[in-house]
Amino acid sequence: MPHIPQLTAEKNRVRLASERALRHFVNRFLRFEPVTDLDRDKMHIPNHDLIRTPHIEVTEVVEFELKLRNIREVLVNFWIKGQTHKAKPAG
């Protein structure tokens, strides 16, 4: 089928409308009281963790470098300043 701008625009319009309706339905369903955490696990939907994760406070000064690896992909390397190795600091 040839790419016609009007068909593409209509397809995008229908997809957006369908996504909105589906997201609304799923959000209502997941907030429905009988849906338990076990049900969410079975559906492979992550349960929100209510326990705060402890964080380690980093006291060392770090150096870093940014590299563009691919389009829209940035590689970040960081290490403790002054170290001879480039192992990542704990935490």
Image: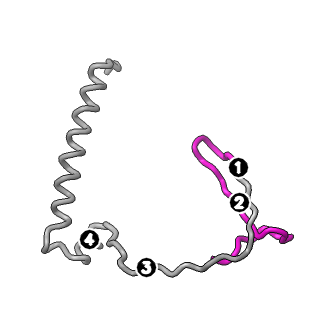
Q: Which residue is mark 2?
A: 77
Q: Position of residue 81 (x, y in %)?
A: 80, 68
Tell me the quadrant of the picture where the C terminus can be found: bottom right
Q: Secondary structure at mark 3?
A: loop
Q: Amino acid at mark 1?
A: Lys
Q: Are marks 1 and 2 in contact (CB under 8 Å)?
A: yes
The answer to whether 65 is drawn above or below residue 82 in the figure is above
Q: Residue at x 13, y 73 (%)?
A: 33
Mark 3 or 4, closer to the camera = 3
Q: Which residue is mark 3?
A: 52
Q: Which residue is mark 4?
A: 40
Q: Secondary structure at mark 4?
A: helix
Q: Looking at the image, is mark 3 or mark 4 earlier in the sequence?
A: 4
- Density class for disc 3 (Cα within 10 Å; few <14, some 14-19, many ≥20) is few
Mark 4 or 1, closer to the camera = 1
Q: Find the distance from the CA under tag 2 to the CA under tag 3.
A: 27 Å
The answer to whether 48 is drawn above or below residue 66 in the figure is below
Q: Amino acid at mark 3?
A: Arg
Q: Residue at x 26, y 39 (%)?
A: 16
Residue 71 belongs to magenta span: yes
Q: Nearer the viewer, residue 79 or 29?
A: 79
Q: Residue at x 24, y 26 (%)?
A: 10
Q: Which residue is mark 1?
A: 67
Mark 1 or 3, closer to the camera = 3
Magenta range is 67-91
Q: Looking at the image, is mark 1 or mark 3 earlier in the sequence?
A: 3
Q: Find the distance from the CA under tag 1 to the CA under tag 2.
A: 8 Å
Mark 2 or 3, closer to the camera = 3
Task: Examine the image and state in which quarter residue 51 appears.
Answer: bottom left
Q: Looking at the image, is mark 2 or mark 3 earlier in the sequence?
A: 3
Q: Position of residue 5 (x, y in %)?
A: 32, 19
